[in-house]
Image: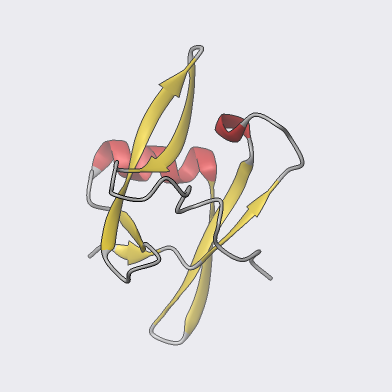
Amino acid sequence: MPKQIRCINKQPRNNPHERILNIGGIEGGVRWKRTQPQAIADIEADPQSYFCTDRAGNSVWVVVATHNGNKYIKTENDDSSQNNLLSLPECP
C-alpha cells in the first residue's frame, strides 16, 4: 500500500538533488520515517511505494532519478514548477 509523504528532513545544500535526508508521514496514527537510500530501495522494489500531494491536492508519485551518477527521489512531473517534496514541512 502506498504511503503518503507528509514531511521531510533536509540538509543545507544548494543542490536540490542532495538535500533530502529523510521522508516521513503518519499511517494508522503511527509516525514513520525512512532515509532517502531506504526510500530509493523501496521505490525500486515497488514504483508505487510513496506519493505526496501538490498544492492543488492532487496525488503525485515519488520516483527515483539520477543526477551526476547519484540517485535521489523526486515527484513525477506535474503542472507545478514548485518542488513538491522540498516544499513539505520538516519532520519532527
Residue extending furthest toward the right: 12
Q: Is residue 55 left or right of residue 11?
A: left
Rendered location of residue 79, percent (x, y):
29, 49
Toward the viewer: 28 or 74?
Answer: 74
Q: Position of residue 83 (x, y in %)?
A: 48, 47
Question: In this image, 87 relative to 57: left or right?
Answer: right
- Vertical comparison of 44 with 22: above or below: above
The answer to which quarter of the image holds residue 15 is: top right
Choose top left, top right, bottom left or bottom right for residue 33.
Answer: bottom right
Q: Is residue 21 above or below residue 14?
A: below
At a point 34% along the width and 65% down the height, the residue shown is 3
Q: Residue at x 28, y 47 (%)?
A: 78
Most distant residue in the top direction = 68
Colour logic:
secondary structure
Residue at the spot 69% in from the left edge and 71% down from the top edge = 92
Q: Nearer the viewer, residue 85 or 34?
A: 85
In the image, residue 62 sits, relative to residue 89, either above or below, namely above
x then y, percent, for residue 70: 51, 20
Q: Quadrant of the N terminus?
A: bottom left
Q: Nearer the viewer, residue 68 or 3?
A: 68
Q: In the image, what residue occupies the spot 38% across and 28% down?
A: 65
The image shows a total of numbered marks equal to 0
The relative height of residue 72 versus residue 23 in the rendered view (above or below) is: above
Q: Is residue 63 left or right of residue 85?
A: left
Q: Is residue 75 left or right of residue 6?
A: left
Q: Residue furthest bottom?
A: 29
